[in-house]
Image (cartoon, rainbow, N blue to C red):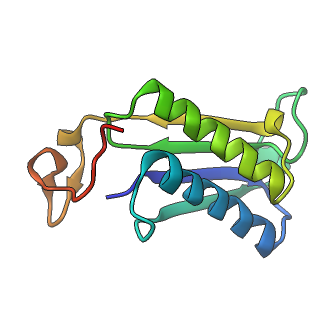
Amino acid sequence: MCPLVKIEILKGNSKEYKKAILDAVHDSLVESFKIPDYDRFQRIYELGKDNFEIPSNKSEQAVLIELTIFPGRSLDTKKALYKNIVDRLAKNPGIDGNDVTIVLYEPPLENWGVRGGKPASEVDLGFKIDV
């Protein structure tokens, strides 16, 4: 089971813009967290201005990225992920790093029901999470 990705942005962006965000986050996870490339579970929520208040120090390109992940990644790996995401979003679709907020949630493996309803702590995941 890959990280669960939830991305929130303002409504009104193109399909290509949204795809660039999804690709930037996924490619960063593959590179930094070493997840399998095929393991992709992502959602974009587009919110109207009346449902998404943005701090005054951010532009309307503000993006909130929430990742629910298996625990075990080191602080250095997390730092690499943050930088990787920000760098990729700056290149395409051109989002300033100050407009990017990333939050990680790490519920214990026994709190994940996977592969037919088994706790992830009892399943061979097929990849390392302690990177």
Which of the 4 quarters of the picture holds residue 107? Answer: top left
Q: Residue at x 56, y 61 (%)?
A: 43
Does 53 sit left or right of 82 as displayed?
Answer: right
Query: Which image quarter holds the C terminus?
Result: top left
Of all residues, the one furthest to the left in this rendering is 122
Q: Residue at x 25, y 35 (%)?
A: 108
Compared with 92, 62 (above or below) is: above
Q: Position of residue 53 (x, y in %)?
A: 80, 37
Does 120 sit left or right of 77 as displayed?
Answer: left
Q: Position of residue 69 (x, y in %)?
A: 39, 43
Does 61 sit left or right of 30 as displayed?
Answer: right
Which is more toward the observer, 122 or 30? 30
Q: Position of residue 44 (x, y in %)?
A: 63, 60
Which of the 4 quarters of the picture holds residue 124? Answer: bottom left
Compared with 55, 83 (above or below) is: below
Does 91 sit left or right of 120 as displayed?
Answer: right
Which is more toward the observer, 83 or 61? 83
Query: Which image quarter holds the N terminus?
Result: bottom left
Task: Report whether residue 111 is seen.
Answer: yes
Compared with 100, 126 (above or below) is: below
Which of the 4 quarters of the picture holds residue 99? Answer: top right
